[in-house]
Amino acid sequence: MASETDRKDLLEMFRSMVRIRLFEQAAYDMYMDGELPGFMHISIGQEATSVGACSALGEGDYLTSTHRGHGDTIARGLSIESAMAELMGKADGACKAKGGSMHVADFGLGILGANGIVGAGMPIAIGSALSSNYLDRKTVTLCFFGDGAMTTGPTHEAMNMATLWNLPVVFVRQNNLYAESTPVREYQGIPDILKWAESYGMPATRVDGNDVQAVHDTVLTAVERARSGGGPSFVESETYRWFGHNIGDPGKGRPPEEVTAWKARDPLVICRSVLLDDGADEASLSAIESEEQEKLAKAIELGRAAALPKLEDALTDVYGDQTLAAAALGEVRR
Ligand SMILES: Cc1ncc(C[n+]2csc(CCOP(=O)(O)OP(=O)(O)O)c2C)c(N)n1
Ligand SMILES: [Mg+2]
């Protein structure tokens, strides 16, 4: 590693990946114990893609994510208190319990939302990038989407418009090899995804999605290009989710040797060994892990102590025009 700044940055990325891993492990356990309501998709194994890409963004930039958005949103700065309270369905949650796991958002942080509709982040990213050009704000929108979302219609409309209007957007495909339980090779008509993206007139790069530094460097090049008026880019980040599609899916359809091979390429372990090779000491890395564990324990306690939302607040923040909310609430009560 080159400089002291690089080491500091990588330590921060390591911390962020640890934070996400611990958060999702806890969320999984709490869900299985019946403590968390709703539904969720765990992204353990994909932390380097979330963190490497988000760490290439600057203040004021935007992010769209997917149904598997815990890692992406925490990597962008969503606090674990806010994220955990949201999963618990508490009034202190990021969306006051109206978003939940699949629709968590924080506009103040530029997080335009995780999204339960596959491919729906793409057109939202286009709108955000268009506003940036229109208002001459020099902000960049990072659009995460899954491998499966690549074959949806909105993706193609979005990629076309991004090129047509030279929009400052970076498309990062989180290729975890499966859409639900269908392998990429069984649904993707054009095997070379880079050619597919290039055919929309944008540069396309493949990166090891479990190597946080490689993801960071690749996405940073694309972000800088977008910010300087160069238009959209496409990044294919190859990674893997350790769990099945959703929390009730054991993921047994995948070859066990494939799962084992990917677990052996744990992004946190890869980052840890780069740091150790570069002279970081074991104790400081363990300290980061304990600090994050403590912060998580506090976030869970805060969430448990937080209030449930009130019925009369059910429609606040739902409609821009509060008279519509009042009217709708009247309908509900009648
Ligand atoms: C428009 C739409 N079609 C289908 C679904 C059901 N669905 C939820 S996730 C998913 C697979 C998505 O795969 P991918 O984009 O690879 O993301 P991953 O789950 O692997 O992160 C599908 C088909 C949906 N939510 N939205
Ligand atoms: Mg997938």
Image: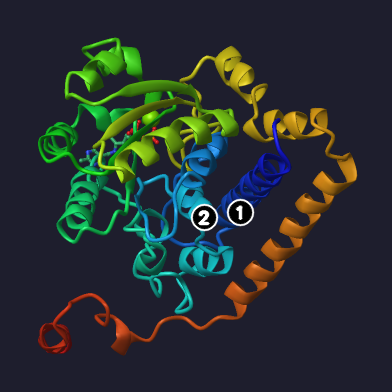
Q: Is residue 285 above or below residue 319?
A: above
Q: Nearer the viewer, residue 268 or 223?
A: 223
Q: Is label 2 within 8 A of ligand 1 (CB to nearest ligand atom)?
A: no
Q: Looking at the image, which residue is at 18% across and 32% down? A: 152
Q: Nearer the viewer, residue 34 or 155?
A: 155
In the image, taking residue 282 as reference, residue 216 lies left or right, namely: left
Q: Looking at the image, which residue is at 26% across and 36% down? A: 230
**In x, y percent, where is residue 54?**
47, 46
Which residue was labeled with disc 2?
Answer: 74
Name which quarter of the figure residue 14 lies in.
top right
Asked if the residue at tag 2 contacts the one at tag 1, i.e. Cβ–Cβ closer than 8 Å, the answer is yes
Of labels 1 and 2, earlier in sequence is 1
Numbered mark located on residue 23 in the image: 1
Q: Is residue 134 above or below residue 320?
A: above
Mark 2 is surrounded, within 10 Å at the Cα level, by few (under 14), some (14 to 19) or many (20 or more) other residues, namely many
**In x, y percent, where is residue 137?**
26, 59
In the image, taking residue 251 as reference, residue 331 lies left or right, namely: left
Q: Nearer the viewer, residue 9 or 258?
A: 9
Q: Nearer the viewer, mark 1 or mark 2?
A: 2
**In x, y percent, where is residue 206?**
41, 20
Q: Where does ligand 2 appear, by image quarter?
A: top left
Quarter of the rendering occupied by the N terminus:
top right
SS under mark 2: helix
